[in-house]
Amino acid sequence: MALILKQSTAVDVLIGPFVDETDGKTAETGLTISQADVRLSKNAQNMAQMNDSTSAAHDELGYYNCELDATDTDTIGTLVLAVHESGALPVRHEFQVIEEGIYETLYAASADLETKIDAIDTVVDAILVDTGTTLDTKINNIQG
């Protein structure tokens, strides 16, 4: 399941577990995970190092705190984070980046259930209109 992130917002994510590449179970607690080690793909585009320059810090049990900045989360859609650090098995996480307004509506403490449902309906309606417009145009182009 993809975790949901707010677009263009700095966030700390817990990544891992990083386990020993030899036995596949011993937690790796002393890794140095730098900016260049954390690779991001936005909507299945080429992977690139994350923008935030902070190294990931070990929390416990092979899990590391990784800071993403507003540039790392600036694209709506799927965000894949991957790390392959020497001595540990590869780690991969998937996030879903959503618009700020939608995020606030869904997760704000003051938002009631009806407001949240209305926000979801608005997004679904926009997707349907966009898809309908796109499909109609493509069909017309094919026929024309």
Image (spheres, rainbow, N blue to C red):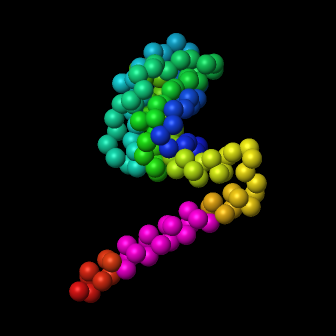
Q: Position of residue 19 (x, y in %)?
A: 54, 24
Q: Position of residue 121 (x, y in %)?
A: 62, 66
- Between 105 and 66, the residue placed more toward the observer is 105
Name the residue furthest left: 144
- Between 100 and 17, the residue placed more toward the observer is 100
Name the residue furthest top: 30
Residue 113 versus residue 138 in the image, above or below: above
Which residues are the magenta region? 121-136
> Count of labels shown?
0
Magenta-drawn stretch contains 134: yes
Residue 22 visible (yes or no): no
Q: Residue at x 26, y 80 (%)?
A: 141
Q: Position of residue 83 (x, y in %)?
A: 44, 30
Residue 52 versus residue 132 in the image, above or below: above
Q: Residue at x 46, y 31 (%)?
A: 69
Dominant SS in magenta: helix
**Which image quadrant for residue 34?**
top left
Magenta-drawn stretch contains 24: no
Residue 73 visible (yes or no): yes
Q: Residue at x 44, y 71 (%)?
A: 131
- Between 144 and 59, the residue placed more toward the observer is 144
- Between 42 and 37, the residue placed more toward the observer is 42
Q: Residue at x 33, y 78 (%)?
A: 137
